[in-house]
Image: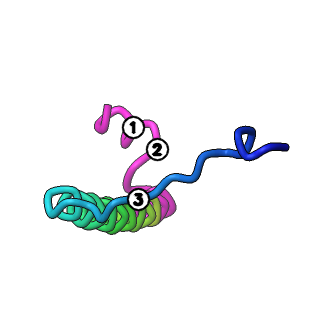
Amino acid sequence: PTSADAAPTLTHAAPSPRESELVRRVEELTQQVSRLEGMVAQQARSLRAMLELLETRGLVTRDDYLAKVR
């Protein structure tokens, strides 16, 4: 292949302060979403465990619970 066939090389200019701030903010928000997803997953596990206990003790049926949350 000739040099005309070679893939062009891209030179990256240093990001502007605005771009750097946006990248930093996106990274912060991504971390925040990840933490929130972890919290929601933990809450879901807790609710499932609580429902299982209530159901085992005969205090509530799954159908009653589902009817309330819908």
Q: Looking at the rendering, in which quadrant would you find the C terminus?
A: top left
Percent x, y of residue 32: 27, 65
> Any magenta on residue 42?
no
Q: Are marks 2 and 1 in contact (CB under 8 Å)?
A: yes
- Judging from the image, what secondary structure is the residue with disc 3 in? loop
> Quick one: label 2 or label 3, which is nearer the N terminus?
3
Position of residue 7 relative to residue 26, above or below, is above
Residue visible at 38% across and 38% down in the picture = 64
Seen from the viewer's position, the closer of residues 34 and 63 is 34
Residue 62's label in the rendered image is: 2
Q: Are marks 2 and 3 in contact (CB under 8 Å)?
A: no
Q: Which residue is mark 3?
A: 12
Percent x, y of residue 31: 32, 67
Q: Amino acid at mark 2?
A: Arg
- Judging from the image, what secondary structure is the residue with disc 2 in? helix
> Quick one: label 3 or label 1, which is nearer the N terminus?
3
Q: Quadrant of residue 17?
A: bottom left
How far separated are the C-alphas under marks 2 and 1? 6 Å
Q: Quadrant of residue 28?
A: bottom left
Seen from the viewer's position, the closer of residues 68 and 25 is 25
Percent x, y of residue 62: 46, 44
- The residue segment tinted magenta is 50-70
Q: Amino acid at mark 1?
A: Leu
Q: Looking at the rendering, in which quadrant would you find the N terminus?
A: top right
Seen from the viewer's position, the closer of residues 12 and 60 is 12
Q: Amino acid at mark 3?
A: His
Q: Which residue is mark 1?
A: 66
Residue visible at 70% across and 39% down in the picture = 4
How far separated are the C-alphas under marks 2 and 3? 58 Å
Label 1 Cα neighbours within 10 Å, binned few <14 / some 14-19 / many ≥20? few
Q: Quadrant of residue 6?
A: top right
